[in-house]
Image: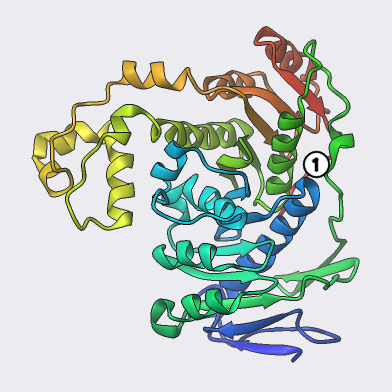
Amino acid sequence: MNEMQLKYGCNPNQKPSRVFMESGDLPFEVLCGKPGYINLLDALNGWQLVKELKKATGLPAATSFKHVSPAGAAVGLPLSDTLKKIYFVDDAELTPLANAYARARGADRMSSFGDFIALSDECDKATALLIKKEVSDGVIAPAYSDEALEILKAKKNGNYNIIKIDENYTPAEIERKQVFGVTFEQGRNELDINDELLSNVVTDNKVLSDTAKRDLKIALITLKYTQSNSVCYVKDGQAIGIGAGQQSRIHCTRLAGNKADIWWLRQAPQVLSLQFVDGIKRADRDNAIDVYISDEYMDVLADGVWEKTFKVKPAVFTKEEQRAWLQKNTDVALGSDAFFPFGDNIERAKKSGVTVIAQPGGSIRDDNVIETCNKYNMAMAFTGIRLFHH
């Protein structure tokens, strides 16, 4: 099949809509559901991301996409008991692929609500059972086990989008798209992100451990498929904060840093000890945690709404306590899709535990950025490559 009709484009008024190949068949097959225009954009971008993560790390990979940018991306490293708890998988059987999805989905659960999932490997039963519990629009993978397919086909009353991608498909070297009736053409971004890109360490601290290199490669590959401007914080094989589509680099760094901080605060004893009312939905629990670690919690206490969410009235998680906990987060990697123009980005990154950085370099203020890294004994590599994606 070389063409598929869609219900509509980005918005319901944008009709007609279809996807098609100028030659040959579509490289994917829809096994269930009726994916839409944005679903397929997420699916195809997400598939490229996880395929590259698998190639770069040798580990199964997963990503959680929303509106053509990843909300999370990760490889299949084992989860600590704390991560199992904050990702709500402490009672689940976990395979390497399931670990990857739990990490990708769990890093920014607010943004991942209603995501499109991409998996680097055959979707197994354990991963399908995790997907079954979450609010999601669909999944793309190179294959599905019989058990996994049965589980996923039952989701959304049989309307869940399940796409099987041809893992051997290679697109043409030239890609095209239209804007306002004008056709744009460019060579595909086939840049291979590997250890060699991290060899030019420009700071006094020259040490990039194997773990740091792995996390920096995860950050850069994630950025390759994130709407620009963008930065990505990574720790222990997973993105913990992605700042996408901002016009200012510092705003990217702050946005992603705030997300990384929330991820870390969710692991604080004050949050782990929260007692929720029975039967609370996952999304409501996520929202409640987000409010609990924000200034809004004081309003919730004042209004007396806490009784609808918690069994026991939680004590305030003060700003002083939060700062003390945040200072314990270390060994975070940071990637940027373009150069940092000022040292303020490094100052903000330091607050979220960043110790290693990869960025293109090339700013007229590179000296200032390097000097700021040296002040905190950070190691920073200049990759010499930009990763804009639009």
Residue type pointed to by label 1:
Arg
Which residue occupies the foreground of this view, 233 or 388? 233
Q: Which of the 4 quarters of the picture holds residue 288? A: top left
Q: Which of the 4 quarters of the picture holds residue 17? A: bottom right
Which residue occupies the foreground of this view, 216 or 111? 216
> Circle 1 sits in a helix, a strand or a loop, which is it?
loop
- Count all numbered tags in the image, as a single digit: 1
What color scheme is it? Answer: rainbow
Q: Residue at x 73, y 14 (%)?
A: 368
- x and y, in percent, of residue 121 in the image: 68, 64
Q: Compared to 275, does 322 lie above or below? A: above
- x and y, in percent, of residue 38 in the image: 57, 70
Which residue occupies the foreground of this view, 342 or 234? 234
Q: Residue at x 67, y 7 (%)?
A: 375
Q: Residue at x 47, y 76 (%)?
A: 151
Q: Quadrant of the C terminus?
A: bottom right
Which residue occupies the foreground of this view, 86 or 340? 86
Which residue carries the number 1 mark?
A: 386
Q: Quadrant of the N terminus?
A: bottom right
- x and y, in percent, of residue 204 in the image: 80, 10
Outermost residue, bottom side = 1
300 relative position to 357: left or right: left
- x and y, in percent, of residue 118 in the image: 62, 63
Task: Inspect this view and state whether residue 160 appears.
Answer: yes
Q: Residues within 10 Å of mark 1 (few under 14, many from 20)?
A: some
Task: Inspect this view and state whether residue 38 appears.
Answer: no
Q: Compared to 162, does 96 lie above or below? A: above
Q: Compared to 246, does 360 lie above or below? A: above
Q: Compared to 28, does 114 lie above or below? A: above
Q: Residue at x 18, y 32 (%)?
A: 314
